[in-house]
Image (spheres, grey):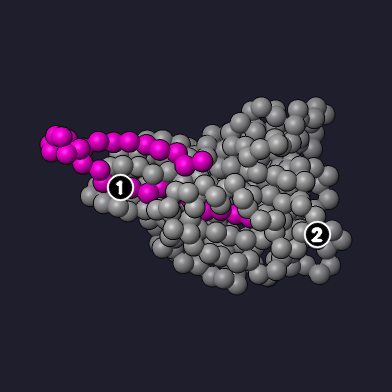
Amino acid sequence: MLQFWRSFVIASACHMASPAAEQVDTTNTDSARALLVAEPAPADSASSAHIVMSIGTLTVENLSLSDTLDVIIDAHGVDPAGCQLKIAVDGSLIDIVKILPGELIDSCDWDMFDARPLTRSDSAAGPREVWQIVALAQGASTQQAPKCYAFDRPATLAQVVLSSAHATNVNDTAAAIFFYWESCRDNVISDRQGASLLISDTVVDRITVAHETSESGFPTRRGTPDECVSPRAAAPPRRLVAFRNGGVVFKLAVDTSDKDSASVQYRQID
């Protein structure tokens, strides 16, 4: 089934205009919430059809972290029926322990979900940790249709289990988790009809990403590059996906009532 999805993606041509990238101050939690609530439709959409794909933002007081971060899909005017995503971790403060299927996969009875770390060479350039997520509503050999393709609200596509057990001496430091492109097959979404792929329109960093990449080729964190354009495509992909990167913000909080102890709190920003 995974091979079927890869074959489908490879057979489809990628098409886009250059994506825009901007940074948002994550210390303002109201701004972070607003990004998820009031996203504009991508620029080339003649209608309201668009998808916002977001990695959540987690604020942790003190260093200890053992929690989950949501990958959220918010579809408007289009039914997603499959996706192939690639996410990466910036720096060494956090590890991805595993990635679990979210409520969309379980509640809608999607046919397949697969998440795995990709092998990275110690000498290879790029992020320290990269994971691939593949999900299908209905496989090529499956007769039973899924119960649904999307909700009328943002829904969790995947849950990223994180740990900072290995990290020490962190004070007001952030660790970004971001979408990452190493080929034209990365970070693409299939619509329900399967006639075309939906690809990046914009990419926004809500936590500063120290890892810089190419803006015009692979690897990149700035969206599908122009080299994926195929003028011969019968049904070129549509630039309808807004990607929102997230991550973890560490803030040291000392309990002044007991100077020998530190308080640890977790808060999920919707």
Asked if disc 1 and disc 2 are in contact, CB closer than 8 Å, the reply is no
The quadrant in which residue 103 appears is top right
> What x and y, as percent, mark residue 241?
67, 54
Q: Secondary structure at mark 2?
A: loop
Amino acid carrying mark 2 in the image: Ala
172 versus 217 height, above or below: above
Residue at 65% x, 44% y is 74
Which residue, given by chain and number where applicable, does mark 2 sit on?
A: 46
> Of marks 1 and 2, which one's residue comes earlier in the chain?
2
Left or right, 260 with respect to 225, comes to left
Q: Position of residue 131 (x, y in %)?
A: 52, 47
- Label placed on residue 269: none
Q: Is residue 130 visible?
A: no
- Where is residue 234, by image quadrant? bottom right
Assess whether residue 193 is covered by the magenta stretch: no
Q: Is residue 153 visible?
A: yes
Tally of numbered discs: 2
Mark 1 residue type: Lys
Q: Which residue is mark 1?
A: 251
Residue at screen point 54% across, 34% down: 100
Give the SS element for disc 1: strand
Q: Please tell me whether residue 258 belongs to the stretch shown in magenta.
A: yes
The spot of residue 41 in percent (x, y) is 70, 56
Residue that sits furthest to the right in the current view = 234
